[in-house]
Amino acid sequence: MNLYFRELGEGDPIIILHGLFGASDNWLSIGKVLADNFKVFLVDQRNHGQSPHNDSFDYPTMAKDLEEFISFQAIDNPIILGHSMGGKTAMQYAVNHPEKWKKLIVVDIAPKSYPVHHDTILEGLNSLVLSNINSRGEADRQLAAYVPEIGVRQFLLKNLTRGTNGFEWKINLPILTKNIDIIGDGLNGKLADTKPVLFINGANSNYIKEEDHGIIKEKFPEARIITIKGAGHWVHAEKPEEFLDTLLAFIQS
């Protein structure tokens, strides 16, 4: 699949993968800072952003997308960073191809299975009849019945775009809805190599708990785990300076 991407800067390559309902521009601020010293690839995963839509949607497939992207762009020995769903894609690729990357950073997700927990969000998104919506404000008001947090709504509604016949979704909402249980799948396999891996999680997030450290170490024996105080699931957006300090210290070590 020919994934959409943004390329910034020059230097050693860093590939960044966004999370569920996200897109490459979620990481643009971080990418611009990293671009001072690195060549940064911000990638839209399939069924998200400006990348193609497809009925196949699981981590082996998305790891294959990443493999093809790295090959097509002739990227040698990249640092790979993935957030949430993107972290699981990055982990699966890393396990499948331990010789084809330099360092791995996983942001606020563990290699375990998660129960479905986006039901209400998907119900809200699917409740919007886009042909009857004339403004983003109207979409926001309707979505508020399902998603009370304004920041989450603003994040989700970045997926709305105006087409020739009104608003339409950038995300492949029917396929995300159909396959939402697959997004919770755990990692298949473990890293059979001693390579540098960093897990960064937010102290206010429940995606990586103390009891998850065992499975992280089982799957990635050399993994370091760093918790950023005051951050939730969107660590990079909520605590960007602390996140960048942690990230750069690991990359440069």
Image (cartoon, rainbow, N blue to C red):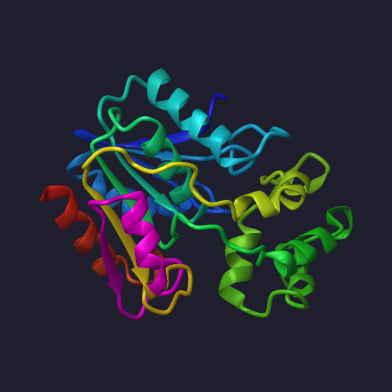
Identified at 61% across, 43% down, the residue is 48
Is 58 positioned to the left or the right of 187 in the image? right
Residue 43 visible from this viewpoint: yes
Closer-to-camera residue (204/137):
204
| Residue 132 inside the magenta-drawn segment | no
Residue 132 x/y as whole percent: 89, 58
Identified at 75% across, 52% down, the residue is 177
Residue 168 visible from this viewpoint: no
Is 118 positioned to the left or the right of 129 in the image? left
Is 106 positioned to the left or the right of 3 in the image? left
Residue 21 x/y as whole percent: 60, 54
Closer-to-camera residue (184/242):
184
Start and end of the magenta stretch? Answer: 211-236
Looking at the image, residue 203 lies above or below residue 128: below
Residue 115 x/y as whole percent: 63, 64
Is 183 positioned to the left or the right of 19 in the image? right
| Residue 222 inside the magenta-drawn segment | yes
Residue pushed farthest left? 253
Q: Count the marks.
A: 0
Residue 71 x/y as whole percent: 39, 20
Looking at the image, residue 76 lies above or below residue 101: above
Closer-to-camera residue (111/141):
111
> Where, by quadrant of the figure, is residue 127 drawn?
bottom right
Q: The N terminus is located in which quarter?
A: top right
Looking at the image, residue 22 lies above or below residue 44: below
> Where, by quadrant of the figure, is residue 92 drawn?
top left
